[in-house]
Every structure is written in C-alpha cells, then in structure tokens.
Image (cartoon, coloured by chain):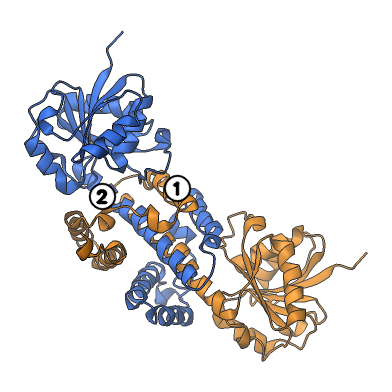
Chain colours: A blue, B orange
Amino acid sequence: MERKLNVVLLGTGNVAYHLAKRLDQIEDFVLIQIYGRRLEKAREMADAIDSQPEATDQTSEIVLDADYYIFTISDSALLTVWRNMPPTSGIWLHTAGSVPLSTMLPYHTASGVLYPLQTFSKERRLDWSSLPIYIEGANEFVKKRVEHLASALSSLVYEASSEQRQQIHLAAVLACNFVNHLFTLSEDWMLRHSLEPKALLPLIEETVAKVKVMTAREAQTGPAKRADEATMLKHQTMLSEVNPNLAKLYQMLSQSIGQMYLKNPAND
Amino acid sequence: MERKLNVVLLGTGNVAYHLAKRLDQIEDFVLIQIYGRRLEKAREMADAIDSQPEATDQTSEIVLDADYYIFTISDSALLTVWRNMPPTSGIWLHTAGSVPLSTMLPYHTASGVLYPLQTFSKERRLDWSSLPIYIEGANEFVKKRVEHLASALSSLVYEASSEQRQQIHLAAVLACNFVNHLFTLSEDWMLRHSLEPKALLPLIEETVAKVKVMTAREAQTGPAKRADEATMLKHQTMLSEVNPNLAKLYQMLSQSIGQMYLKNPAND
C-alpha cells in the first residue's frame, strides 16, 4: 500500500476551510498542518478536522517534507508568505483566480495552481464532485501531481493557462459577485418598502433555471430588452430619490442591455 | 353547479401564453377569446388551447359579457387598446408591474391588477403554484373577484398598492433582468476566450442556493468585497481593451459593493 500524501494548508479563510473539510474525506491524502496568521483561527480550523492537523502561526514551524503546500490566502498576502517560507520539498499550489503562476515561481520551482471555480462560505456544504477545478503546473511533473490532487477533489478538472484563469475569474466576478450584489440591492429595495424580499426567490430561481437550458442571451426579458423607455425613466427617478449612484447603475445596465439587443434600424 | 367564468385574454406575448396555458388547466375558468394585434399570432395561441378560444384582431369583435378581460400587452400599447375597447361588463385586469391602476380606471370602473412576479419565456414550463401574484382592485367587489382568479392560478396571492407594485417591479428588474444580463456578459466573455460558458453553472447555482438560506448581503464574496484593488484594476484593464463600457460597468458595480461593505475607519 502506498503511503498517504501529506498536505500543508496555508490560510484560514473560506476556501481553506472547505479544502480542509474536503481533504479530510479523501483516503489518499492527509492534512497534517494548518498555518494561519492568527494562531487562534488556525487552531479552530484544525479542531474541526478529523486528522487532527497541527496548527501554527510561524512559517519557521512549517513541516518541510510535505507532498503539497496549498496557499489559500488573500492575493495581497501571498507574496509576503512566500517570501517567509522555509525551503521545502513538495509541490506548492495557490488557489487564486487572478494570480499568474509566474508570480510564484521565483519562490519555489515545483509550483502550480489549483483554482476551484466556486463561491465559498463557511455556512454552506459544498458539492465538490461537480465543482470545476482549473489547474496549471510549472512543468509536466508538477502538472501530473496537481492533477492527481485535483481529481481526488472533483471529477471536473480542466487545464487552464494563467491568462485563461484570469479570464475565467473575471467572468466569475460578473456571474457571481456582481449578481449577488444585485440580489442584495433588490432585497434592500424590498425591505425599504416593507415588502418581503424572499418573494423574489421564485423569480431568481427561474432566472437561473433558464440559463441551464438556453443561453442567457436568449433568456433576456425586461424593460431594457423591450426598449420600454417610460418604465426605465420611472425606475431611474424612483432610484435617484434614494440613491443617485444606484440610478446611474440602473442606467448603465439598461444601456448595456439596450446595445446588445439593438435591432438594425435598416431591417425594421 | 355554478357556471364556468369566462375569460377574454388580450395579448399574445410570453405572459399571455403562460396565462392561457394555465387557465386551460383550471376547472372553474374557461378562456373563450384571444385578442391580438396580429391575427396570426392570436390564432396560433388559440390553437394551443384545449378550450378552443376564438381568435380576433378586431376590438369590435370582442365578446362583451365575459367575466374577466386580462390585458397582457406591452405597457406602451395598453392605452391604445383600452381606448379602442367596446364597453363591456366584467372585470378588467392588467398584468404590468409599472402601470398604476389609476391609468386604467378612466376606461373601465371595475378594474384591477394581477401582477405575476416571474420572468416568462415560451420555451419554459412554469410552476404557477409557487409563483407570487400581487393583486389590486378598484374597490372591494373587484378585489374579491381578482383574488378569486389569482387564487386559482397560484397559492401565493398578495395585495399590493400600485406604488408597492412599482417597487416590486423595480426590485425584479435588478434581481432578474440585470442578473441575466450579467450572465450574458459572463457567457460572452468565456466564449471570447474559447472557454466553456456552462462551466460557470455550478458557481451560478451556488450563488442562488446561498440567497435561499442567508441574506444576499451575508453571501457577498469577491474582489470588491475584499477591497482587492489590484485584482479590480487588472479586470478593468482586461475589459477596457475589449469594451470600455463594460469596464465602466465593472467599476460602478465594484464601487457599489465597496461602499456597502466599507468599514468605518474609526473602528479599524
């Protein structure tokens, strides 16, 4: 029997939490250590893991001979942690959408990327099996090792270059972070007018159900698609009384829709 | 046994189509006539209905003694159709989010509103039972009649004033039309970079699954929430090379998120 592959996890945020929980379920891998800038948070996460990983806030205490080091810390903190890392064996991986692999290579040659395309919240259980993971490796050896790990996490593993991954990350910001912000704005608007925000849920669910069976372009409806200027103007007036920035945002989004569905006047 | 209640439907768009299909399923109501500006479209819809309603493109041919007249035509065409309607008995209802009941009253006293909060596409089957319907009536008699019809269509019937309905419609535009547009922009972006757009679906589904169990405000993630200026600047640069308007939209949405999660510097 082959020995289990040791993993050190660096980070205590939402992605780190879900990765730790997932690794705990996988036979071939064992999470042996969690590093966090705040020892308390690293301990808290370690306590939630069956394999009882060690917790540390000192880079000098990091295990040197693990098979994988997974850095799931904020983009801005990555460089600092890499700079302070002791020389280790094993593969280094980061999980960031927007950080090119080349940024990491000066600190460790056997480096790669494991980018799970998902939004992570600690409160949620995640279905890893249907979660696309985009991988990259500095060379064929690393790529195979990343693939081995990624395939254990999910059945949807794709290769993507640093440039492609940045494009995916940008698309994800549009389709998830911005979409969720619009959900927040709509919930706030309902609450402001003493209406139940959750009444929007069937509409939101149908909006998503549609893009599962047709393109979003085909699924578009609403005043901007219909070029219903009167309604758009009314909405902008309603918004500008409360929040001029939101009125401007409404106008820009409506214009963007309008431009997309603009018919060629010559064909009318 | 009471007689069935007769309904005349005016309009041949997506809402009209789904209403016609739904009325066809309900024992107590019978769709007897469909009016459309284009006879062909009215005929096409009538043919799809078991009760075999009559199709017409002439307001002069509209049945005068129906119980309900439901106007599901574009906001801008409503006034023209009302102006050309013959005097009828029965209740007149419109289904528009943004049209106040007062606009309709000069044409018919027994008027009301039946506003289904949903996005309608002909390609989709709809679950009417969980679809919120907001109703309004010019008086108690009308209100009861609208409620009777709405309750037959769905189990989620709420009263809403014209002003409330406009607020709901605005929230729906944010949560559905604008959200779908962001889905379109993200699909387009993936395609532009030869990436599979449907790989975003697990992310999109999780984004919606989250707002079912927490507030959207709590669910927010992403560079703007983290105040990750480097990533936002990179994304804006990537977008501005392709579409400066989209870069501007990215900036506005990020600013809107940033303002919402801005910590009070005094507390830092």
Residue at image mark 2: A167
Position of B152 relative to A4 (above/below): below
Alpha carbon distance from label 1 to label 2: 20 Å
Q: Which chain is home to disc 2?
A: A
Position of A65 relative to A71 (above/below): above
Where is residue B79 drawn, in percent x and y?
61, 86
Q: Residues within 10 Å of mark 1 (few under 14, many from 20)?
A: some
Residue farthest to the bottom, as pictured: B106
The quadrant in which the N terminus of chain B is found is bottom right
Residue at image mark 1: B205
Say which element carries label 1: helix
Quarter-of-image position of residue B67: bottom right
Q: Nearer the viewer, residue A161 or A109?
A: A109
The quadrant in which the C terminus of chain B is found is bottom left
Residue farthest to the top, as pictured: A1
Where is residue A146 drawn, in percent x and y?
24, 28
Q: Are marks 1 and 2 in contact (CB under 8 Å)?
A: no
Q: Name the residue: 68% across, 77% down.
A: B93
Does residue B55 appear in the picture of this structure? no
Does residue A195 appear in the picture of this structure? yes
Where is residue B47 drawn, in percent x and y?
73, 62
